[in-house]
Image: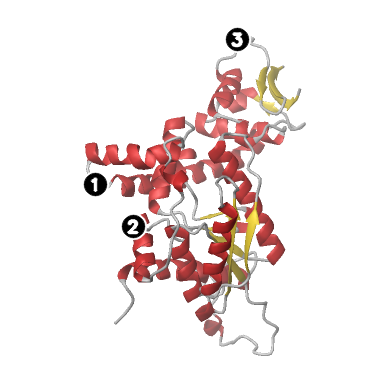
Amino acid sequence: MGPHPAVAAIRLAVRRVLHDILNDHQTPGGPGLHAPGAPDRRAFGTHPDPTAERPPSPLVLVACSGGADSMALASALAFEAPKLGVRAGGVTIDHGLQPGSDLRADEVVQRLRELGLDPVESVAVTVGRDGGPEAAARDARYAALDTAAERHGATAVLLGHTRDDQAETVLLGLARGSGIRSLSGMAAVSGAGGRYRRPFLQLDRQTARKACMVQSLPVWDDPHNADPAYTRSRLRHEGLPALEKALGKGVVEALARTAQLSRDDADALDAWASQAEASVRDAAGQLECTKLYALPSAVRRRILRRAAIEAGAPAGSLFARHIEEVDRLITGWRGQGAINLPGRVVAQRQGGRLVIRQG
């Protein structure tokens, strides 16, 4: 008799990601040994040299808060990694936002060690205020995970975001009106060098919780996740249930599907903008307004955004309204003055050229 269906589902999701990581690890900078498009040694009648030095076994860390999603992920990693020759460890982040958070972090460390993960550590962070409490906590968390991954030489860090988290992210992006990229939600692979992997984006939150229950894994429910003071909490407990009541079941799945379709479209437009950028610059590298005007607006605005970021505008502070104002220098030119952007960057039209620079 095999494992419970929920346990089988989380293990399969992790196994697939570990195979991807191994392929990337075995052939850096190219397709993996068994990836689509990789040469099949058997087709050439050759075999790997058994005496050749093999790269060291990769280390994969799981970011674990102690909640059901990340505990299910940790358990699946602990089960699958040894079978594939992958070292598995864990990191828990103590945000210091609640009394006794350090003690809870120690409990998570103990649970991860009991699963057989090694190395395991707790990292305390200081959460700032920029962008609001949720964004500040996220920034502090990812900075700590980056540092931990580099310190341990980890190839990848697994994150327990589920399909439900993806649906919430899409709705938040829709509410902000930030464009198709914000509707793309979270990528399955992100971060420098593809460091962050999200195996559970096709699984719902209930599957992860069920997997913990049938394996008798203790979980901790963060009270912040039920606190209406936080936007995502209100969306989770009020917004999504209201949508499902009005539209019927399947809203979460539809939103997750929207994320993937939007990501495919956004990636294609980004590639188009990257290819088109050279054609709209003159010999001195200045952006030519006439050539920019001829481009589709979705492509043109991507070029403008990239130029603003290259000039020093912080990507996280550069919103759609900023790019729209710069775009009007191209499409609605009436002699208007310079546009001030975040990071003390200024955009202005000069002699048929769009100049974006530090002011």
Within 10 Å of disc 2 (Cα), the crowding (few <14, some 14-19, many 20+) is some
Q: Residue at x 69, y 66 (%)?
A: 153
Q: Residue at x 56, y 39 (%)?
A: 135
Q: Is residue 21 left or right of residue 161?
A: right
Q: Earlier in the sequence, mark 3 or mark 2?
A: 2
Q: Which residue is mark 3?
A: 334
Which of the two marks, 1 or 3, is nearer to us in this view? Answer: 1
The amino acid marked with disc number 2 is Gln
Q: Which residue is mark 1?
A: 249
The amino acid marked with disc number 1 is Lys
Reply above or below: 110 against 224: below
Helix, strand or loop at disc 1?
A: loop
| Residue 37 in sight here | no
Q: Earlier in the sequence, mark 1 or mark 2?
A: 2
In-front residue for pair 238/221: 221
Which of the two marks, 3 or 2, is nearer to us in this view? Answer: 2
Q: Which mark is residue 206?
A: 2
Q: Which mark is residue 216?
A: none
Q: Is residue 232 left or right of residue 6?
A: right
Residue 140 in picture, x, y percent from top left:
63, 46
